[in-house]
Image: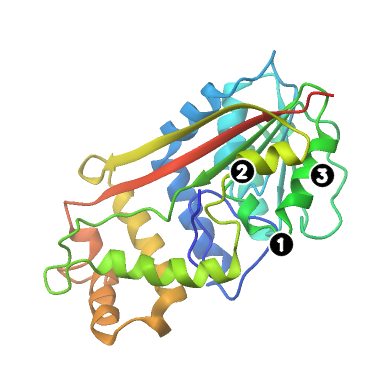
Amino acid sequence: MSDSPPHAGHPGHHHGHHHGHHHGGDDQAEMLDLGADVLAEHIADIIAWLPVEGSPGRIVDLGCGTGAGTFALLARYPEADVTAVDSSSEHLDRLREKARERGMAERVRAVQADLDADWPDLGTPDLVWASASMHHMADPERALRKVHDLLAPGGLFAVVELAGFPRFLPDDAPPDRPGLEERLHAVADRLTAEQMPYRGADWGPLLTAAGFALAGERVLTVNIDGSRDEAVGRYALSSLRRIRDAVADELASEDLAALDRLLDTGGLGGVLRRDDLAVRTERAVWAARRTR
């Protein structure tokens, strides 16, 4: 998934490298939680599709964020334990809290680590999951080799990336500044490309170069109707706030004013009052096996 705007975490999870400032961790954690809720069915579909051999007992979630992937993997593989790795202590605290609430604390080991530095001991997993985290690494090719050497022989590595930060608004919105969201994304994409050159990469050849055998590849289209799920409005609000942080200095003043009207939770023109929102994006998935 090529996803996050610069200085903004993203809907999948967040990992290894921090770029620029963010709001407090709570804002990003809320966005990750909302994304996990809204996209839960898609995450479950991806995990069900993975060409896993047997039932993995040991799983590592790299760049786990607040646990969207961790808990989906635990649900799919009831015998498995997950080692959840992230650079953010706030995200890991939230993940541990969820594990306790769900009676899964015994099955989750949370590890705080900067994956651009020395890697902690992550055991010998049968499955490694990295959702929206690989493109954040300072040296993703090194990270791929690390995962290859970590995996048990025959083990699987799943790389999931978002093709762009999700879109929420119709093309003609808002009426006074139609096309606003596309302009926001154009600025965010330009800024992010400078900071994260692997955003939007084709991970297939990179995985092969790291010694993996590709075992599958697919793209899922996400299009969730916001009128049927009130969490979509909150997810749109949280996501657009983070984009605003990243792009405010580069936007035309009229666009910034229009964006602020959308973000006004008390205003009639705010996203929480709209009944035409949707979550539109694509997720690309690569499954790769360690053959020796």
**Residue 101: x %, y % from top left:** 58, 38
Residue receiving disc 3: 146
- The image shows residue 52 at horizontal and vertical percentages of 65, 20
Report the quarter where the C terminus lies: top right
Quote the CA–CA distance across marks 1 and 2.
15 Å
Going 53% across and 45% down the picture, which residue do you hit?
A: 161
- Tell me the crowding category of disc 1: few under 14, some 14 to 19, or many 20 or more residues within 10 angstroms, Cα based: some
- The label nearer to you, 1 versus 2, is 2
Compared across the picture, whether 188 is left or right of 104 comes to left
Q: How many marks?
A: 3
Query: Would you name the residue on which mark 2 appears?
Result: 203
Amino acid of disc 1: Ala
One can see residue 61 in this view: no
Query: Secondary structure beneath disc 3?
Result: helix
The answer to whether 229 is drawn above or below residue 76 in the figure is below
Q: Is residue 250 left or right of residue 193?
A: left
Task: Give the x, y percent position of residue 244.
Answer: 39, 73
Q: Which residue is at a point 50% across and 48% down the rendered structure image?
A: 1
The numbered mark, 1 or 3, whose residue comes first in the sequence reads: 1
Q: Earlier in the sequence, mark 1 or mark 2?
A: 1
Q: Which residue is mark 1?
A: 138
